[in-house]
Amino acid sequence: AASADVAALLTKGACVSCHGANFSKPLDPSYPKIGGQHADYLFVALKSYTVEGNNVIGRSNGVMGGIAKQYSPAEMRAIAKYLSTVPGELQTVPQSRFR
């Protein structure tokens, strides 16, 4: 379970309302499943929504931009760290080296 601080941050952003139960059942199929994703990736993704006017490192999404701008980098890191521990549907599937 999330710490009280992280739970408050997730509630503030209403993350479950779009990303769904366990952050793996999005409201819309175009929304990403974020439960179990790598913490570093989640942090960079969240932070990139706060960048404006730079299409190389920024992400353009009005809803996520507004949500991400509520958080400090330390808060984003805490959210990302927690979400990486949530058992999600994302998995690495080993592939044979030779096909």
Image: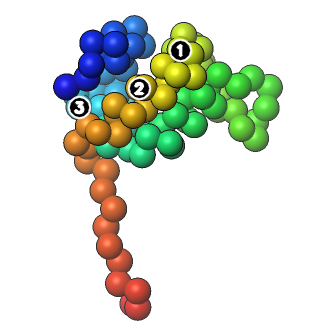
Residue 69 image offset from top left, x and y in percent: 59, 14
Query: Of helix, strand and loop, which one carries label 3?
Result: helix
**Which sits earlier in the primary sequence, circle 2 or circle 1?**
1
| CA gap, disc 2 and disc 1 | 10 Å
Indicate the amino acid at tag 3.
Answer: Asn
> Is residue 95 at least partly visible in the picture?
yes
Q: Position of residue 7 (x, y in %)?
A: 30, 15
Please state, as top left, top right, bottom left or bottom right, where the C terminus lies in the image: bottom left
The answer to whether residue 25 is seen in the rendering is no
At label 1, the amino acid type is: Tyr
| Discs 2/3, front | 2
Disc assigned to residue 43: none
Are discs 2 and 3 less than 8 Å apart at CB?
no
Please tell me the numbered disc located at residue 22. Answer: 3
The residues bearing labels 2 and 3 have C-alpha atoms spaced at a distance of: 14 Å
Question: What type is the residue that disc 2 sits on?
Answer: Ile
Residue 15 rendering spot, x and y as whole percentages = 37, 20
* Location of the N terminus (image quadrant): top left
- Residue 68 placement, left or right of 32: right
Q: 10 Å neighbourhood of mark 2: few (<14), some, or many (≥20)?
A: many
Q: Which residue is mark 2?
A: 79
What residue is at 52 percent from the left and 34 percent from the top?
A: 43
Front residue (pair 14, 83): 83
**Residue at coordinates 29% horizontally, 32% vertically from top-left?**
23
Q: Is residue 47 above or below residue 11?
A: below
Query: Mark 1: which secondary structure?
Result: loop
Q: Return the disc, 2 or 3, that comes first in the chain's sequence.
A: 3
Circles 2 and 1: CB distance less than 8 Å? yes
Residue at image mark 1: 71
